[in-house]
Image (cartoon, rainbow, N blue to C red):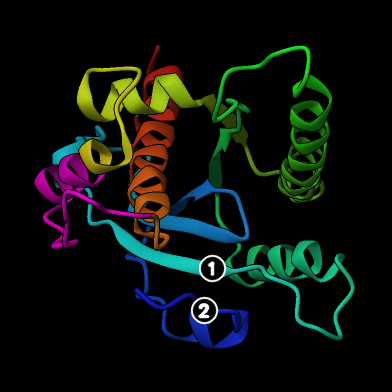
Amino acid sequence: MRPTGDPEAFVAALPKNKDGDVLVLGLDLGTKCGCAFTYVNPAKPVVEENLEMHLSLWDLSAGAFDSGAIRFVRLRRFLNLMQPSLIGYEQPKFTPSGTVTRFNAGAIMARAAKSMEFFGALMSVVASWSEENGVPCQGFPIGTIKRHATGKGNANKIQMIEACNKVFDTDFELTEDYKTTGVDNVADAAFICSLTATTYANGVSE
């Protein structure tokens, strides 16, 4: 799946919704931003297996002559053009790749701070856009998303992609030595989208 950095072209190709349906958007925020959206009818029950999921990968990277802020400008541009009615996103959690010791703690914390600043800024863009446009928005912990998809809160990338292929009838290829190409972000976004739709529907109906 090739990332798209052109919001206008992406939105121009969106499938049209039926009368009465609303657009639910799920985002796995990052430079390669997993995107999944579906249309639901608020008057009907939401059944995950029946959702027609549309998947994409947004390129939020900055070029050689771009400022770092272009990432956030591009994300807001996508939202402005898509005009979703409901948004869900993953709340990131930093997990060190190795054991933390008194010798490497400073370096690990520096990487964590930089990473969380970036993800925090992306979440702020989504949250502020939602508030400005009166759109319900909710973040979900990583473990909650994984548990919703696989039944296990510590599922790995391959298990998430396998679950996406099974539930949403995608055909993402897998290998034993899979290394991230962004497809795992898209799989995460699919379950964020379905979790957002079902959570909101249940909340409204109670």
Q: Residue 20 carries which label?
A: none
Mark 2 or mark 1, earlier in chain: 2
The answer to whether one can see residue 21 in this image is: no
* Left or right: 30, with 47 as reference point: right
**Label 2 crowd bin: few (<14), some (14–19), many (20+), radius 10 Å:** some
Q: Mark 2 points at which residue?
A: 4
- The structure residue drawn at horizontal position 60% and vertical position 26%, both measured from the top left corner, is 96
Residue 105: quadrant of the picture? top right
Q: Residue 14 location in percent, x, y? A: 41, 77
Q: Residue 144 location in percent, x, y? A: 41, 20
Residue 176 magenta-drawn?
yes
* Left or right: 170, with 88 as reference point: left
**Label 1 crowd bin: few (<14), some (14–19), many (20+), radius 10 Å:** many
Q: What stretch is highlighted in magenta?
A: 161-179
- The structure residue drawn at horizontal position 41% and vertical position 47%, both measured from the top left corner, is 189
Residue type highlighted by circle 1: Trp
Q: Residue 143 location in percent, x, y? A: 43, 20
- The structure residue drawn at horizontal position 39% and vertical position 28%, both measured from the top left corner, is 145
Residue type highlighted by circle 2: Thr
> Is 34 placed above or below 123 here?
below
> Is 50 placed above or below 109 here?
below
Q: How many labels does the image show?
A: 2
Q: Mark 1 points at which residue?
A: 58
> Is 102 placed above or below 167 here?
above
Q: Residue 154 location in percent, x, y? A: 34, 20
- Asked whether the beta carbons under mark 2 and mark 1 sit within 8 Å of each other, the answer is yes
Residue 54 magenta-drawn?
no
**Can you say which quadrant of the picture contains the C terminus?**
top left
Residue 107: quadrant of the picture? top right
Label 2: element kind: loop
Looking at this view, is 149 or 113 the one in front? Answer: 113
